[in-house]
Image (cartoon, helix red, strand yellow):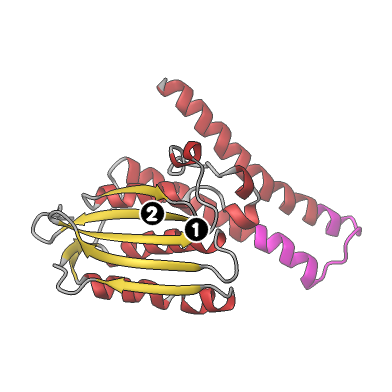
Amino acid sequence: EAEEIRRRMAADIAHELRTPVSVIRTQLEAMLEGVYPLDAEHVAVAYDQALHLARLVDDLRTLTLAETGRLHLNMMRLRPPDVVSRAVAGFELLTQDAGIKLNVRVEPGLPEINGDPDRLQQVFANLLSNALRHTSQGGEITIEAEHGNGTVRFSVTNTGEPLKPEHVARVFDRFWRADEARRRDRGGAGLGLAITRQLIKLHGGKIWVETGEDRTSFIFELPNAGDSPSA
């Protein structure tokens, strides 16, 4: 089983790397052979693919380090309202431009948590980017923080067609994307949620998905400060 997983992962990585490499090669060959002019417009296509390739390699490295427990976390005591506020600040303009309402609900009196502020922002960025891709104009995205059982519970909920039951079971798998999100411009490389799950695990927490008739919620819990693992 482990060997089959390794082979499938290698095939997935090769598939994801093949597209940007092919585009870069084709674009450069066309310019060298005079098919395309050597101008900013055509160089920009190759440059964009090079950026995508670099992001993919960085994501793979982050995921590998996280899965093997070798990703360093800069742990400190954090106030949940501050964590949420920082996450919201980076997406307010994006939701406004997309015509999507952004709701924020933070329960008062939440205890502090231990966490790496930058890695937790990466978690929220992945979840909010995912919600933004799957919320139509006029829809809503809601970020919540509330008391759990010895934890603080965070959630990111978006309106729209919910995940299918068979998709819920695979949504955190590396390189997996729902059929309707297979296109790279909508579905990304399929690593964001896999990284998110590993980052939450490294913080001593857990993450899961809940779906309703017209909404999908990604929910994660982190231990209250004093119960969390230290870096």
Question: Tag count in the figure?
Answer: 2
User: Does residue 37 show up magenta in the picture?
Assistant: yes
Q: Quadrant of the C terminus?
A: bottom left
Q: Which residue is mark 1?
A: 130
- Element assignment for label 1: helix
Front position in the image: 33 or 97? 97
Estimate how packed mark 2 is, as few (under 14), some (14 to 19) or many (20 or more) residues with alpha carbons within 10 Å. Answer: many
Residue 73 image point, x, y percent: 25, 57
Q: Choose top left, top right, bottom left or bottom right for residue 110.
A: bottom left
Mark carried by residue 167: none
Bounds of the magenta segment:
29-49
The kind of secondary structure the magenta stretch mainly shows is helix
Q: Amino acid at mark 1?
A: Asn
Q: Is residue 11 above or below residue 189?
A: above
Residue at the (12%, 61%) spot, across then down: 225
Q: Is residue 22 magenta?
A: no
Residue 127 x %, y %: 43, 59
Taking 94 as reference, is 228 left or right?
A: left
Frontmost residue, 18 versus 140: 140
Q: Are marks 2 and 1 in contact (CB under 8 Å)?
A: yes
Task: Report x, y in % for residue 69.
Answer: 27, 44
Residue of label 2: 218
Residue 183 spot, x, y in % from top left: 66, 50
Amino acid, disc 2: Phe
> Disc 2 to disc 1, how far (Cα)?
10 Å
